[in-house]
Image (cartoon, rainbow, N blue to C red):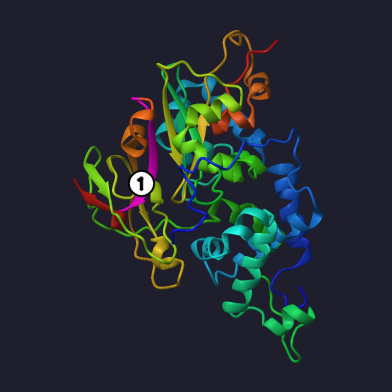
Amino acid sequence: MNGIHDMGGMQDMGPIEREKNEPVFPEKWEGRVFAMFLAAGAWHRWNLDAFRYTREVLSPVDYLTVSYYEQWHSGLVHLLVSRGLVTTEEIESGKPAAGTVKATPPLTPDKIPAALPNRIHAQRDVKVTPRFQVGQRVRAHNINPVGHTRLPRYARGKYGTIYKDHGVFVLPDTNAKFAGENPQHVYSVRFMARELWGAQAAEKDSVHIDMWDDYLESA
Amino acid sequence: MEKGIVDRATLDALVDTYETKIGPRNGARVVARAWVDPAFKARLLADANDAISDFGFVSKQGDRMMVVENTPEVHHLIVCTLCSCYPWSVLGLPPVWYKSAPYRSRAVIDPRGVLREFGLNLPHDVEVRVWDSTAELRYMVLPERPPGTEGMSEEQLAELVTRDAMVGVAKVEAPK
């Protein structure tokens, strides 16, 4: 979706504001929302792509003004309800529906050290023939899907070179809507800055963008 | 919690993990090791998961990482234009500026201007490579080892390494 989240290349967002010695979680509820995201995610009822999409569908005004963890919170509530872990009534009342048997959480403190290095779990150990080879010249498709995609607008239709084959990963475009993993090769594609931005960019500079097989055509 | 979907002890442990255990000190140890151990550095650049698993911060078969090396000729910068992807396992959770619209939007179109805002003026002949984290690869920059650190131990070197240098918005300063 051509939304505000896809902001690579915009120039009117103002100066970068930095805070010295910024706490990890300035407010306690932010840490709690973050932890709930990980702990509830361990049920594997949704995936990271679906979670990202909940942020992308926010209105542009909300996306730019609502705080980061508030956005996480609304995305998490949406997934908890839409994926059947909690009902709207339970969210509103804060109490389980009558007769609910208490579940056992999949993530417990003892499992955290082993769970975190495999949190994303998007790589697939399946054999898929890569469509492109390192060094090959490619063009990113010019597509404008209404749903989730990880092909940023600023790269669409642009020419680049395959720099590295990262292996086989699930395709976010379908995975985000639970329409299949479509495992395929992901490549680091090198785009020269002048191909992306024209003559104002420095001649030798480049942007490396990770792209799925389905995003590319040979050129 | 009352439904047993999550429990309080797990939530507290997760918050504590990212507040006190997983942060840029992890990445700093990896960088310092690469500075003193050429064999480790070669492994780190070839297969970051394999090398970083020596410290236990990532697993060999787990979520993928890639490390890119800054040199006098090439400067790397990490961004996620589409959301907020960041190498949690070695740098902890991202600072607000990394997730902010100004950084995400301009890092790809004007990396040199962004670096100037961070106080880093790169010479024109240095090549800038920006890594937009659009997939499930997490990037970290291996900064240049500053001059004047020849006699320092791995532990002392790790103290010099900053989060910003591992994102690529700063260099590691020589000790005063």
Which quadrant of the figure has residue B2? Answer: bottom right
In the image, residue A46 sits, relative to residue A169, either above or below, namely below
Residue located farthest toward the bottom when viewing the structure as drawn:
A99
On screen, residue B130 above or below A181: above
SS class of the residue under badge 1? helix
Q: Is residue A106 in view from this perspective?
A: no
The reply, left or right, for residue A44 in relation to residue A92 is left
Residue in the image at 38% along x and 29% along y? A200
Amino acid at pointer 1 = Ala
Q: Position of residue B145 (x, y in %)?
A: 55, 17
Which is more toward the observer, A44 or A70?
A: A70
**Furthest residue toward front:** A12
Which residue ends up furthest to the left in the rendered image?
Answer: A219
Is A96 on the left-hand or right-hand side of A200?
right
**Residue at the spot 25% in from the left edge and 40% down from the top edge:** A134
Does B58 appear in magenta? no
| Residue that numbered label 1 is attached to | A155
Could you tell me if residue A207 is visible in this image?
Answer: yes
| Image: magenta residue range | A203-212
**Magenta highlight on residue A205:** yes
Q: Chain of mark 1?
A: A
Q: Point out residue B169 in the picture as x, y percentages from the top left corner.
A: 56, 29
Residue B31: horizontal and vertical position, in percent? 56, 27
Most prominent secondary structure in the magenta stretch?
strand
Q: Quadrant of residue B156?
A: top right
